[in-house]
Structures are given as structure tokens and as C-alpha cells.
Image (spheres, helix red, strand yellow):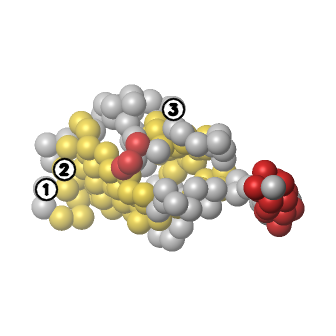
Amino acid sequence: MKFIIASVLLAASALAAPANVQRSNTLQISDFRASNSIINSASMHFVVTDANYPDDTPTECNLLWTYGNSPEQRARCNYNQYYIRFPDGPVDYNLFTLELERVSGPIAEKGQAKLSSKTFPWKCVKDPKEGITIQCNYDGVLNMEV
């Protein structure tokens, strides 16, 4: 009897679940900024929001490295959910490609965004203040296709 009741409840819950859950094809990147100091200490910060993983995001991503070199090859965002890569090589804030890849979970995601200081909304300023040689920020939310 218990088996029959459990089977009926399981079948009812399967029928009540949404048949076609929509998968999001974009990651949203906000609070995106980068800077380099006079001692070539580069930093980058952004926040990733992923509609496919609402329990894991938003999550912050922070990088520190020596400007002119590539950041650590296996760099990840906080909580280790996303790899951060620069497939075109060492980062020049005036022109670079950012790549993010989901490390775990049932929905595979990998996307790239090319940023150039010559096109708004990625904006870079040289020598904005003492000790900083370049400072850049993205005005708004960047949608990265995955």
C-alpha cells in the first residue's frame, strides 16, 4: 500500500513539474573594473550572475597578477564555479578577450567577450590618480553569450 501511494505521489510530482524549463544563454557581468599600478600590479574585479545557477550566483571574481603577463592559468571566481581565461594571451586593458567557463553543474557553459577601450561601454583612463597607470570600467551590465 505504501509503495502504491509513493508511486502515485512521485508520478503526480513529475507531471506537475514544468515540462520545458528555459535555459539562459547569457551570463551577466556587472561591477566590472580593472586597474594597473606603477609597480605593474594588475587587478580585475567583476560579478557574474547566471540564471541557470541562481543558487550559486551572483559570485565575485577577483584577479591579481603582474601586468604584461598572463594571470594564473587555472584562475577561478570565488567558490570555484567559473574558470577565468584570457585566450588571446597577456591582458592589455585596451584590448583583450575575457573567457568564462562553468566548472561544475549539469549545464555546460563557456563564453567569451572581447573588450576594447575604443568602444563604449569599456572605458579606460590613463594615469587617473597617483600610482595608477591605467584604470578601466564597464558602464552597465555585460551580457556574455554561452
Query: Mark 3 touching mark 1, by CB under 8 A?
Result: no
Is residue 103 found left or right of 73 in the rendered image?
A: right
Whole-Å distance between the Cαs marked 2 and 1?
6 Å
* Residue 83 image position (x, y, % from top left): 46, 39
> Looking at the picture, which amino acid does disc 2 mark?
Ser
Whole-Å distance between the Cαs marked 2 and 3?
23 Å
Quarter residue 127 falls in = bottom left
Q: Residue at x 62, y 61 (%)?
A: 51
Q: Residue at x 34, y 34 (%)?
A: 71
Q: Earlier in the sequence, mark 2 or mark 3?
A: 2
Q: Nearer the viewer, residue 23 or 105?
A: 105
Q: Residue at x 26, y 38 (%)?
A: 65
* Residue 73 image position (x, y, % from top left): 39, 28
Q: Which residue is mark 2?
A: 37
Depth check, mark 3 against mark 1: the one in front is 3
Q: Which residue is mark 1?
A: 131
Depth check, mark 2 against mark 3: the one in front is 3
Is residue 73 found left or right of 36 in the rendered image?
A: right
